Image: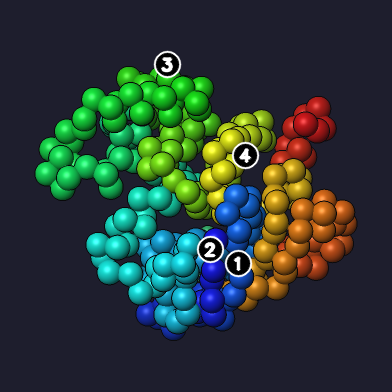
Amino acid sequence: MLEVKNLTKVYDDGTVALRDLSFEVQDGEFLIIIGLSGAGKSTLLRCINRLIEPTEGQIIWNGIDVTAASSEQLRKIRRHIGMIFQHFNLVKRSSVLTNVLAGRLGYVSPWGSLIHHFPPEANQLAMRALERLGIADQAHKRADELSGGQQQRVGVARALMQDPHMILADEPVASLDPVLAHSLLGHLERLNQEDGITILCTLHYLDLIQRYASRVIGLRDGELVYRGSREDIRSMTDEEFKEIYGEEAERVSAGLTDGGI
Ligand SMILES: Nc1ncnc2c1ncn2[C@@H]1O[C@H](COP(=O)(O)OP(=O)(O)O)[C@@H](O)[C@H]1O
Ligand SMILES: [Mg+2]
């Protein structure tokens, strides 16, 4: 279980990105975080694994206080938290396989990671991760030769190499077209359901939120303004969504010429 307690983040320039946020995420949830640009979604995801240092409050994960963890403890915690980004964050000039192996860096000795020497079983794990994502045949291509949808699947395979118990996905489909967005979220859903990986994901298309969320929280100006169950979000009207979200609902299916998926 993840517990976020009274989390506040004030950036050095005085911007209050998160204000006294508290919520819990049970293991195995597919939590979708909604909110307009600037609401604090990325800050929240990055505070959870302390890529950004919280100003106040606590992050407790499976009873361990992440906010109080030493750098050594933090390294161990981060091994089990995968991250996926909007712009994939791959090393473009490296091969797909090398990018996936990079997900394993937390596991090899500092020496090993320095010289990029991975044990043979790491290669097998990487190939298996690529197979699960349906792109094993791309393993030896340069990352930037792949399409956007394929690159994001490499990002997921890289996260899988950590044997994650939780995946933080920050706008993972914002750079993808509707069909690819569904495909990518389908992969995340399978990891959620088959492996029990907890997913925290920011998304802003209402149809995708309704299709994939097991629960939704809404942020506005760094405050938690909405908590909804799967049923709440499925039965939500456009008017209600607008009230919570602050803008008209957008749908990926609107981007499809045949009018829906
Ligand atoms: N490094 C930073 N320094 C100062 N302000 C920042 C920084 N990063 C984000 N912010 C501000 O914090 C607020 C929340 O940003 P962010 O977490 O990126 O929101 P979202 O991901 O929902 O768009 C915004 O007002 C943003 O401008
Ligand atoms: Mg963001």
The span from disc 4 to disc 2 (Cα, nearest Å) is 18 Å
Disc 3 to disc 1: CB gap under 8 Å: no
Mark closest to the chain's N terminus, 3 or 1 = 1
The span from disc 3 to disc 1 (Cα, nearest Å) is 39 Å
Which mark is in front, 4 or 3? Answer: 4
The disc labelled 3 sits on which kind of residue?
Asp
Q: Can residue 184 be seen by looking at this rendering?
A: no
Give the quarter of the figure containing the C terminus: top right
The disc labelled 4 sits on which kind of residue?
Gln
Q: Secondary structure at mark 1?
A: strand
Q: Position of residue 175 (x, y in %)?
A: 55, 42
CB of mark 4 near ligand 2 (< 8 Å): no
Instruction: State whether residue 27 is above or below residue 247.
Output: above
Q: Nearer the viewer, residue 225 or 144?
A: 225
Q: Which residue is mark 2?
A: 2
Q: Secondary structure at mark 4?
A: helix
Mark closest to the chain's N terminus, 4 or 3 = 3
The span from disc 4 to disc 3 (Cα, nearest Å) is 25 Å
Disc 4 to disc 2: CB gap under 8 Å: no
Mark closest to the chain's N terminus, 2 or 3 = 2
